[in-house]
Each structure stands twice: as structure tokens, then as C-alpha cells.
Image: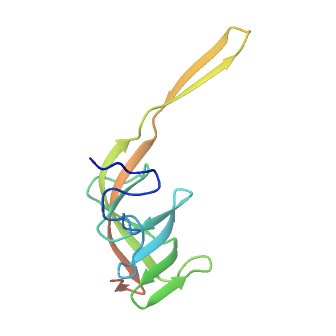
Amino acid sequence: MVASSPGTSASLAAPASPMTDSAPTPGNPYAIVEASGQQFWLQPNRYLDLDRLDADVDSTVTLDTVLLVKDASGTTLGRPYVEQAKVELKVLAHRRGPKILVYKMRPKKKTRRKNGHRQELTRVMVQSITVAGKPVS
């Protein structure tokens, strides 16, 4: 058995790669959009959960509030929105988020209140990102 000190490494493990699956990569197009008061980073053929949308399952929703578009030709930044840019989303399901417990207590007063909350969500799939009618790819 080989003893190793804390400063040395006994095994030759491969270092973790700095690129993760969720990080933007130079070859993959993406868009940053504003929806339900928040900003979301979207890529084609990926899904995400938004606040509940008033749309049926398997319907298409179009977002016009595109803040930034990145593709192979470069980055287009909106002021405040990119003109003629759209993101098409397909509604996959209506869901509920995880339960959050809110517990309030005033010490020495015998006052306690416990509430629960589950956010209503809509899971959507990004179908396409288009600028001036041309798909970004």
C-alpha cells in the first residue's frame, strides 16, 4: 500500500472538464428571453418550466420579448428587444413545483403559523429561434 501525503495525489484521475452541459458553447445558438417577469436562457430542443401559461397542451406559444440572440454569425443585442426576433415554444404539460413550507413563529408569545405553497408551472419545449423570419442555427 502506498501512503500519500495531503499535498500529493496517489491516483491519476482525469481532471473535470470546465465545460458543463448547461454552459453556452460557441457552436450552439441560444437566445435570452423575458417571460413572466424573469429572464431565461433558451436553446432549441431543450425544455424548461415557466410560470403557468394560459395555453392548451400541445399548442404553440410565441415569445417576442427576445433580449439577445447568439448564433454562428455573432451576437445580436436588443435595445431593449431584438427586432423581428421570435422564439416558438411547444407546451408539453402543466405541472406544479415542489412544496415550500413557510413557518412563522413569535417566541414567547405562543403564536405559530404554518403555510404551504406549490407554484403552478408550465413545461415548454423550445422549437425554434428566428430572427427576421430566418431560423437561427
Q: Image quarter for residue 70?
A: bottom left
Which is more toward the observer, 94 or 11? 11
Q: What residue lies at 45% left-to-right and 35% top-to-bottom?
A: 118
Q: Nearer the viewer, residue 21 or 43?
A: 21
Q: Image quadrant for the C terminus?
A: bottom left
Q: What's the colour scheme?
A: rainbow
Rendering quarter of residue 105: top right
Estimate the x, y position of residue 127 in percent, counting from the top left: 30, 70
Q: Residue furthest bottom?
A: 73
Depth order, front residue of 67/26 = 26
Image coordinates of residue 90 in percent, x first then y, are 31, 62
Q: Position of residue 63 (x, y in %)?
A: 44, 68
Residue 37, position as x, y percentages in the image: 57, 57
Q: How many marks?
A: 0
Residue 99 to residue 120: above or below? above
Work out whether 26 lies above or below 20: below
